[in-house]
């Protein structure tokens, strides 16, 4: 069996990562995958479950030396993949000929661009940062073009953010995990229970959604928000005293806690501004919702509309207060059974077209062909 | 010129040397033992109560420890506890305090919560304390103001316990170890004010130990537990040339009154694990809280003692590899900033204000008037530089050429693992000299 060393920029205790099952479970059926996590806190190397290598971040510059010191044979790997860290990619490329592996770069999300957009949304001048970003992107493109393959989350993300990467491309999209489906808990209350999970910041403009809820005359709804940005959320909700009692804040610490919260809800909200950061791939929260059979209200984006159909297995609307309010009003007229049926269809649709079993098989095939 | 011969000779009367003396005297049939101490009494350097944070580093709140490392330190830390309990030294030199590792901010809180679940398997007594619980256990870490009316804005969480022995005066423990060793039937000589300058390997008598006062001792087996000087002596014999020593001095700041109820440790940066700030109730200063240690590279091997500058230069073993290690360290902005900041912590007039800024991560209401520089407190941690791997080694290092001599460098948590390290060396000595070892009694008493 071929071997892949996956070097991720995620931290050791990450458990909200939706893509983890792809590398942890599904790809393992075709390729042996070892995963390197970096820890900012622990000072010694640890090997967990035989294939998780926890490396202190101070060894980033001498990663292979540290792994070799801990009896990990770099020569045994056919592929070394780096996630999102171009400096580490450079390091991996430097030793490609020495160890004889194929170098792969995984691009999961345009983090630097998001940072700039967030700052802009707060009214900060980002001219200099945009210039730096342009230079960095050029440099990154050059480095990535030296790799053997590029693994973006979606073709649109590739085209929009790194259009000059010409090497073989293997898509690595988020998908639904067939083995982690959570049963949907039908509740008997009259109210419709909405849920939003994920980051809250200026860029996501969540106030547009709250404004829409504020417009609703029908008060038979509840909204649960699970976010790590609890302080931001509290501050934001101060501006909505009329609906504050209907909104509950959570900070789900584990993937299980998050999925349980979703499973106890009726409709998931995945409304995001129509900008490339959000429209070039399907938001991970959509997969979170459908994992529990909870249907999702999403923004119109060319990406998600290729998977779902409005009113069949999901609902779509524009990211506009009145549009959202209209759609919410419509959703409040539906019965729990009708909503659950949409959720079940959406889950089935994802299982058919976007599940990790299929994604893993595709990646494995394409890696073998490299 | 006087010559004394011993079966085993130990150089260094700190906690590591005395622990080995005790174990050999108590659990083996060694014919004779000798301990050579450079100064007029035991534990005058890093083992002294004022030189370290007096902590039993079991691995539960030391956030830089991996679970694997904590399994090892737990055993050795428990040996310290067992020794003290065996001789009824609890509440005399060993104490129970509340202790916790505090996470401040979203990232650290996330880390502490997960670490708690991982480490609870090894330390079942651990509890996870949220902000409400901390208001009662350690209120000063929760509130922004002295009147305790305003809670700090960032999220906090702690993992900790208040049921365990946490604190030992390692200086007093060194004395207790020697006292118990001398109560056995094994002839045990201790020579103070005896500075070893050279060790020679001979054919007939394995080792000759030359002292500054002209005395020559001979021994069949030698263990050097002399802090940074262990490497100095090893280099003189041609051993450990692949290592250099970087002496890191730590200073402390003391509060003017009782401040914290227990030990509060911060989440450590893996790049600087020897330098995490913590607050400890000082058992030698009426429970006043000691904040520190700082970390400053000093060009000498012993703090608050004259000389040893030349020894530092020799022990550093300077060459291209050392330059490479320094280069790798200094090109990291975290480390660079940390070094600069810690240098400023030693500069009079500005040091207190700068230190308070850092210590406020533990006690947000701490002010410059609350603390003073603890003069005479702090020691030197001999951090080892591995020239082959071109990296700074963390924790302890041992050179054992296998011919009857061992050199130990034991920076933190060396005191906690003194009896564990001594066990390792004792087993080596027993095998090398063909001695009897009462393992059953040893395991019964100390594990």
Image (cartoon, coloured by chain):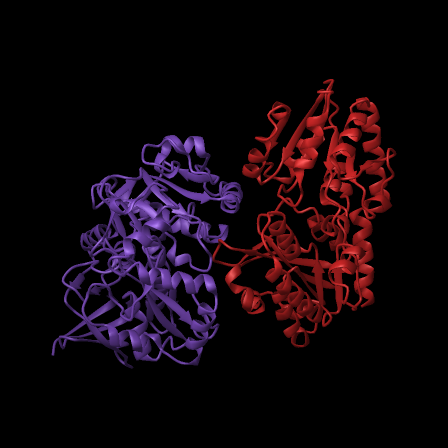
B114 shown above or below B69: above
In front here: B255 or A179? B255
Pick the front one: B225 or A84: A84
Q: Residue at x 41, y 51 (%)?
A: B73
- Reply above or below: B289 against B315: above
Tint of chain A: red
Give the x, y percent position of residue A166: 79, 68
Q: Is residue A346 left or right of residue A6?
A: right
Rendered image quadrant of residue A360? bottom right
x%, y% of residue B139? Answer: 36, 34
Residue at left 34%, top 40%?
A: B365
Q: Is residue A331 above or below residue B316?
A: above
Residue B280 placement, left or right of A150: left
Chain that is purple in the image:
B
Does residue A180 appear left or right of residue B334 in this picture?
A: right
**Labels in figure, total:** 0
State the image coordinates of residue A208 (x, y, percent, origin top left): 69, 36
Q: Could you tell me residue B280's position as x and y percent?
A: 31, 45
Quick one: A334 or A147, which is closer to the camera? A334
Q: Is residue A264 visible?
A: no
């Amino acid at each position: 069996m071929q071997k892949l060393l996956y070097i991720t920029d995620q931290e050791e205790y990450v458990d909200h990562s939706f893509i983890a099952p792809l590398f942890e479970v599904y790809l393992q059926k075709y390729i042996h995958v070892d995963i390197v996590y970096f820890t900012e806190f622990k000072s010694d190397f640890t090997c967990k479950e035989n294939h998780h290598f926890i490396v202190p971040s101070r060894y980033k510059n001498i990663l292979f030396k540290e792994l070799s010191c801990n009896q990990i044979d770099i020569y045994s790997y056919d592929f070394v993949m780096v996630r999102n860290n171009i400096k580490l990619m450079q390091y991996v490329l430097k030793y490609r000929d020495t160890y004889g592996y194929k170098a792969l770069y995984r691009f999961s999300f345009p983090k630097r661009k998001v940072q700039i957009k967030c700052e802009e949304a707060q009214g900060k001048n980002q001219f200099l940062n945009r210039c730096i970003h342009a230079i960095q992107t050029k440099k990154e493109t050059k480095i990535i073009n030296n790799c053997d393959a590029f693994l973006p989350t979606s073709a649109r993300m590739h085209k929009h953010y790194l259009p000059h990467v010409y090497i073989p491309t293997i898509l690595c999209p988020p998908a639904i995990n067939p083995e982690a489906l959570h049963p949907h808990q039908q509740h008997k209350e009259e109210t419709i229970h909405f849920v939003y999970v994920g980051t809250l910041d200026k860029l996501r403009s969540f106030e547009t959604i709250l404004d829409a809820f504020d417009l609703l005359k029908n008060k038979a709804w509840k909204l649960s928000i699970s976010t790590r940005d609890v302080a931001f959320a509290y501050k934001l909700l101060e501006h909505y005293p009329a609906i504050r009692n209907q909104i509950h804040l959570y900070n789900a610490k584990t993937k299980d806690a998050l999925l349980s919260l979703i499973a106890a809800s009726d409709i998931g909200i995945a409304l995001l501004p129509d900008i490339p950061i959000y429209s070039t791939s399907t938001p991970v929260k959509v997969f979170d919702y459908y994992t529990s059979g909870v249907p999702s209200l999403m923004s119109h984006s060319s990406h998600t509309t290729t998977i779902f159909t409005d009113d069949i297995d999901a609902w779509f609307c524009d990211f506009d207060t009145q549009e959202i309010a209209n759609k919410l009003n419509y959703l409040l007229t539906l019965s729990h059974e009708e909503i659950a049926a949409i959720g079940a269809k959406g889950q089935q649709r994802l299982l058919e077209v976007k599940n990790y079993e299929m994604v893993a098989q595709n990646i494995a095939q394409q890696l073998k062909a490299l | 010129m006087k010559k004394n011969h011993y079966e085993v000779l130990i150089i260094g009367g700190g906690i590591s040397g005395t622990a080995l003396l005790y174990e050999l005297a108590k659990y083996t049939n060694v014919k004779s033992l000798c301990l050579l101490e450079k100064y007029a009494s035991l534990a005058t350097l890093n083992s002294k109560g004022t030189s370290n944070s007096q902590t039993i580093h079991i691995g539960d709140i030391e956030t830089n420890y991996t679970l694997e490392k904590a399994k090892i330190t737990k055993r050795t830390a428990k040996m310290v506890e067992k020794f003290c309990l065996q001789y009824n030294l609890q509440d005399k030199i060993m104490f129970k305090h509340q202790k916790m590792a505090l996470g401040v901010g979203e990232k650290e809180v996330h880390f502490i919560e997960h670490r708690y679940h991982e480490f609870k398997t090894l330390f079942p007594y651990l509890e996870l304390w949220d902000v409400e619980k901390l208001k009662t256990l350690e209120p000063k870490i929760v509130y922004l103001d002295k009147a305790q009316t305003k809670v700090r804005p960032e999220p906090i969480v702690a993992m900790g316990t208040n049921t365990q022995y946490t604190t030992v005066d390692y200086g007093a423990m060194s004395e207790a170890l020697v006292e118990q060793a001398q109560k056995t039937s094994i002839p045990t000589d201790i020579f103070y004010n005896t500075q070893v300058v050279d060790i020679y390997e001979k054919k007939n008598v394995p080792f000759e130990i030359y002292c500054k006062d002209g005395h020559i001792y001979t021994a069949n087996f030698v263990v050097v537990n002399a802090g940074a000087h262990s490497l100095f002596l090893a280099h003189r014999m041609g051993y450990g040339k692949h290592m250099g020593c970087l002496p890191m001095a730590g200073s402390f700041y003391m509060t003017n009154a009782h401040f914290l109820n227990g030990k509060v440790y911060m989440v450590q940066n893996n790049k600087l694990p020897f330098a995490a700030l913590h607050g400890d109730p000082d058992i030698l200063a009426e429970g006043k809280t000691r904040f520190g240690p700082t970390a400053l590279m000093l060009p000498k091997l012993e703090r608050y003692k004259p000389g040893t500058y030349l020894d530092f230069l020799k022990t550093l073993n300077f060459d291209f590899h050392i330059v490479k290690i320094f280069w790798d360290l200094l090109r990291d902005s975290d480390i660079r900033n940390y070094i600069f900041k810690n240098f400023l912590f030693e500069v009079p007039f500005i040091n207190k204000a700068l230190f308070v800024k850092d210590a406020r991560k533990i006690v947000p209401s701490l002010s410059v008037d609350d603390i003073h520089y603890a003069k005479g407190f702090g020691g030197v941690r001999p951090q080892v530089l591995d020239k082959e791997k071109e990296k700074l080694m963390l924790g302890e290092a041992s050179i054992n050429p296998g011919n009857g001599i061992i050199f130990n460098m034991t920076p933190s948590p060396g005191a906690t693992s003194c009896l564990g390290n001594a066990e390792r060396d004792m087993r080596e000595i027993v095998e090398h000299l063909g001695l009897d070892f009462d393992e059953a009694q040893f395991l019964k008493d100390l594990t």
